[in-house]
Image (tube, grey):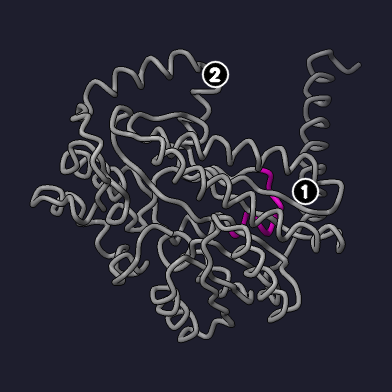
Amino acid sequence: MMTNRLKGLLLGLGIGLGVAATKAFFTRQNAFSLRGRVVLITGSSRGLGFALAEECAMQGARVIICARQPEPLEYARRKLAARGADVLALPCDIQDRKQVQRLVEQSLAHFGNIDVLMNNAGIILVGPAPEMTVADYEACMNTMFWGTLLTTLAVLPAMRARQAGRIVNVTSIGGRVSVPHLLPYNCAKFAAVGFSEGLHAEMAREGIKVTTVVPGLMRTGSHLNALMKGKRQQEYTLFSLLATSPLTATSAARAARRIVRATNKGATECIITPQAQLLSRFHGLFPGLTTKILSLVNRTLPTSTEDREQASAGKESRSKLSTWLARPGEKAAHIYNQYVVGQRSS
């Protein structure tokens, strides 16, 4: 006779196999190749957006890149085209509803449809809360929430009509855990996460897959164009070290590959870097403790000058020490167009 223990083991094995089979079934159901697809990527003249454009092109996609300033955008287009990409570059300020609508109309006129939208555009504003103005919060919300919303609403009608499409929203671990000295950025990313997760729930029955990407720190060279307030040199030294060290940040190319794989699978969520995974899970289990720990961390960060002066780009806040510490990010800065003249955050 079969013992109770053996029955339990067999039952557990059966449940495990059933879960694995179900997961494999839905993975096959959601399988999606980028070859021949049209992918629109916002904020793609540099940084992660440019890395995503490269990866999508390598997968055989036709790529639409956009950013606010025409000159850096054309520079990015030439680099992609030189590698054989079928690429269309369209200047667009995603904070402007009319420009977003024109961007989508021009994309549809050129390629006929948009299969994938990757909302990537963002700005980084670093400094203590007393330094931040209402305009700082507005700037972050306008780009990372309203910009995401406007582009999504512009592509949704055609996707819903086809009952097909993918929307990928690049948020941040700062949209799950509000880390010190990034408060306007965190607020915008929290809003983007809420929009993305809610949209996933509502669009699934219409054949549209929405993926929420939650990156940790990445070596994109973005530390050079992040905006610093308060004690700028100190803020930049700490931020550039964290954003470039191999111990704390992953490469932009690796992040782009992870995001494209998640897009292909129709994944609900994609958390990038083990550090972001750990912080997100820990905060989910112990939110109060996480906040207390971050309060202690904040005591070690630069204090406020409360002068509320205009922010300056990271590359304008460098010192000899920060330049030396951020050397691992220098190669990424050149690869991902962070030194292109005339660029600001896009």
Assign a secondary structure to mark 1: helix
Classify 306 as above or below 216.
above
Q: Nearer the viewer, residue 234 or 267?
A: 234
Would you call the spot at circle 2 few (<14 residues within 10 Å), some (14-19), or many (20 or more)? Answer: few
Query: Residue extending furthest left?
Result: 320
* Residue at x 64%, y 57% (from the top left corner): 151
Query: Which residue carries the number 2 mark?
Result: 285
Where is the N terminus found, in terms of image quarters?
top right
> Image point 59% across, 65% down: which residue?
99
Q: Residues within 10 Å of mark 1 (few under 14, many from 20)?
A: few
Which of the image's four quarters has the C terminus? bottom left
Position of 169 with respect to 157 (left or right) is left
- Frontmost of labels 1 and 2 is 2
Residue 104 lies in magenta, yes or no? Answer: no
Q: Is residue 241 above or below residue 163?
A: above
Disc ID at residue 24: 1
Asked whether the beta carbons under mark 1 and mark 2 sit within 8 Å of each other, the answer is no
Q: Amino acid at mark 1?
A: Ala
**What's the amino acid at mark 2?**
Leu
The part of the chain drawn in magenta is 260-268
* Quarter of the rendering containing residue 11: top right
Seen from the viewer's position, the closer of residues 245 and 68 is 68
Q: Position of residue 255 (x, y in %)?
A: 48, 55
